Amino acid sequence: MASFDDVFKAYDIRGVYGNGIDEDLAWKVGHASAQFLRSLLSGYDRGQSATNRLVIGRDMRPHSKFLSEALVEGVTATGTTCVDLGMIDTPMLYFAVNHLGACGGVQITASHNPMEYNGFKICGQKARPLSKNAGLEEIKHIISTLGRMPVSASIAAYQEIDLWDEYRKHVHGFLHMPRPLKVVIDALNGMGGVMVSKVFDGTELDIVALNFELGEESVTSPNPLMDTNLQQAKDAVIKHGADFGVCLDGDADRCVFVDDTGNTIRCDLMTALLSRHFLADNSGAAVIYDLRSSRVVSEEIRAAGGIPRRERVGHSFMKKALADSNGVFGGELSGHFYFRDNYNCDSAAIVLATVASILATQDSTLSELVKPLNRYSHTGEINFEVEDKDAAMKEIIAAFPDAEVDWMDGVTCQFEQWWCNVRPSNTEPLLRLSLEAKTAEMMNEKVGIITQILGSPVEH
């Protein structure tokens, strides 16, 4: 049986339903989240009907409904109005918190994990993310003081609201298509199927839909970073002669693109491509990228008149950096893309709309647009099982004494011709290597040296 501590992760609460994640915990999460998020408001704000509301939503997992019902009772037991959006994608929750002026929100989801998992993503006012170092520990402490879920203790209102029309209008602010495109969209049996139908039906997108059925077991884990999960989209792009394909994760906040030739486009190259689009009308603005990204990202940002800002991995760091710098856009290697005009939040719907808009105004194919960006050899992220992470990172520094070293997130070693980053997992005994070099031969050579230190890579 998973312990109470086991389900609290760096950025959310997550585990197997019935083994650490259950209705009792859901009630406590609702109760503690409402308490904590209202405590951040001024006395004046706490008395306002708009701010004294917490928004909730849920994904397609069969147990999400049961968790949602318990969560509602926990929220309303604090005297906080609970606004239930029903079954939605996570980015819609961020939109709703801002649109309604709520004190925060909770999405019931386990994102890309298999169907037996579930959990809670929590955000504060203006959809600011909560994490282990920003609110999640306080909520964990409040939960630890609560008894078992009472049968009924609601003392505030409960509202069900449909915001799909407003959300569709918001996303369409990023969609400008002078000509139609054929697009393959694989929802991996997650919330993307609902979102795409609600938001993009009736537009210039001719959609080839894959795995739009909710909660089916045909996809073991709705994770677009798994090569096996991309194959159907790749095959469909070729079969249907599509302009591009996109594969969404379970709660539709992340995505991976496939070009018109059926090849995967690495997400940092998409960040580089999209940077030029957003900087065209925002010269001098910052663009945020995570430190695993190719050097081509910073080069393209500078070439487009922007200011590149390198940041730690993780949505809480990326969103804060985007807000602090008044940046216009940001992207991570993991498939999260962030937008100033989306409350600094990530959204698969908006990046899909943006890529479609770029292509619809171009004579070039997506593969032609990306080709000049693929000018370095990059490993992607490689995992190694390592117990003593600190000792291993110090050993890597010792192996490259001439490197320019920084410790922003793990250890990064920079050279003129190549660089590497090795960072520890927050939740597992893993070190994650990202390495890039001028040539494939150099990349393989450096990976070989580091493998001698870290051991054989593991699948993850």
Image: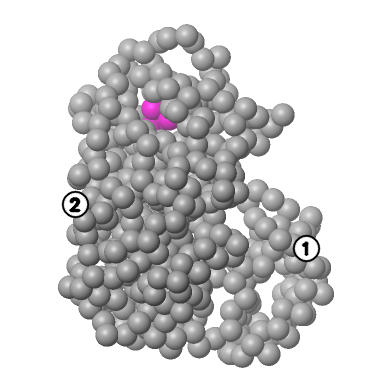
Please state which amino acid type lies under the numbered disc 2.
Lys
Please indicate whether residue 431 sits to the left or right of residue 318 in the image. right
Please state which amino acid type lies under the numbered disc 1.
Ala
Question: Residue 169, which numbered label?
Answer: 2
Residue 339, by quadrant, is bottom left
Residue that protrudes farthest toward the front in the picture: 239
Q: Position of residue 128 (x, y in %)?
A: 37, 46
Please indicate whether residue 282 sits to the left or right of residue 124 in the image. left
- The N terminus lies in quadrant: top right
Nearer to us in this view, 176 or 307: 176
Nearer to us in this view, 117 or 339: 117
Q: Give the range drawn in magenta.
A: 32-37
Find numbered disc 1 in the image and state the secondary structure of the residue it sits on. Answer: helix
What residue sits 35% from the left and 33% below the top?
Answer: 86
Number of marks present in the image shown: 2
What residue sits 62% from the left and 76% below the top?
Answer: 379
Would you name the residue on which mark 1 appears? 391
